[in-house]
Amino acid sequence: MSVYAYASLRRTTPCPDCRSPADWVGVQALVGDSLRWDVEVTCPGCGFAVAECGGELSDDVREELLGEHGGAVLRLRAPAHRVTVLRVLCAALGVELGAAKGVLEQVWGGTYVGTVPEVELLARRLREAGVDAVASPGRP
């Protein structure tokens, strides 16, 4: 299983055991055909260590990832059939048709931004459906 795209955060947080400064690292990665959010905390003071793998990425941490690393813009490099793109967006994002239409308008307008792993996964699923899509680093 290969990692195709990732974004990480590093900070110092109080150790859950001894309250000394501990190292906190979170990574969102596109692994295989799915997104993962993994967190590891290690304390050099008392030796505490824990890893939580496959958790949910909270909205505030997602915004922090975007702030620190910037985002990626989903771009369609060639005209695409609207129904095909909507079908992929509904399935990939787990949204209803109305919400997918809003996302499609952002994609066509070059303003749909997400973390690099999120947008790379969408681009890959669109390519699998025959749509020429790429994840371009940066803001719209």
Image (spheres, rainbow, N blue to C red):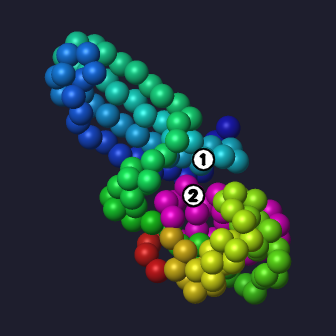
**Is 108 above or below relative to 9?**
below
Residue holding disc 2? 118
Residue 120 in percent (x, y) is at: 61, 61
Judge whether residue 119 is colored magenta.
yes
What percent of the width, then of the height, locates residue 134?
Answer: 63, 71
- Residue range (magenta): 114-136
- Tell me whether the residue at label 1 lies in contact with that at label 2, contact meaning CB atoms closer than 8 angstroms: yes
Q: Is residue 11 left or right of residue 73?
A: left
- Please give the label number shown on residue 80: none
Residue, x 31% and y 15% (percent of image)? Answer: 48
Q: In the image, which disc is placed on residue 35?
A: 1
Residue 22, by quadrant, is: top left
Given residues 23 and 102, the one toward you in this image is 102
**Residue 106 on the magenta span:** no
Residue pictured at 75% horizontal, 59% vertical = 91
Relative to 60, is 17 above or below? above
Q: Earlier in the sequence, mark 1 or mark 2?
A: 1
